[in-house]
Amino acid sequence: MTLMTADAMTTEREPKGPGPVPSEPEPVPRDPVPAEPEPDEPGPAPTEPPGTKPGTHPAPEPPD
């Protein structure tokens, strides 16, 4: 064990290594999270207005 003086303990040591030390670590890439999971079963069917055939849309009302 090497004894150090107070001056040697308070000064910052030079980083060892060939390149500069990054100030911030690189962010770890994360897997994208789906906004909404896919449902296993389809949701309820949209309700159709009475008197229409399934799958058809009522005609727009003409302006007065």
Image (cartoon, grey):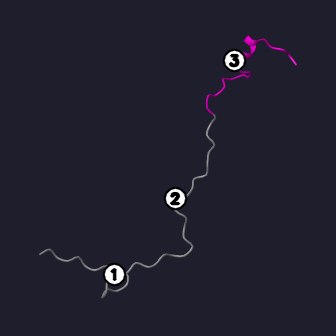
Q: Which residue is mark 2?
A: 35
Amino acid at dot 3: Glu
Disc 1 secondary structure class: loop
Q: Is residue 26 above or below residue 53?
A: above
Question: Is residue 16 shown in magenta?
Answer: yes
Residue 46 percent location from the top left of the image: 40, 78
7 horizontally vs 32: left or right: right
25 horizontally vs 59: left or right: right
**Measured Cα–Cα span from mark 3 to mark 2:** 46 Å
| Residue in front for this viewpoint, 55 or 9 | 9
Q: Is residue 21 above or below residue 46?
A: above
Disc 3 secondary structure class: loop
Q: Which stretch did the figure color magenta?
A: 1-24
Residue 51 percent location from the top left of the image: 30, 88
13 horizontally vs 46: left or right: right
Residue 28 percent location from the top left of the image: 63, 42
Q: Which residue is mark 3?
A: 12
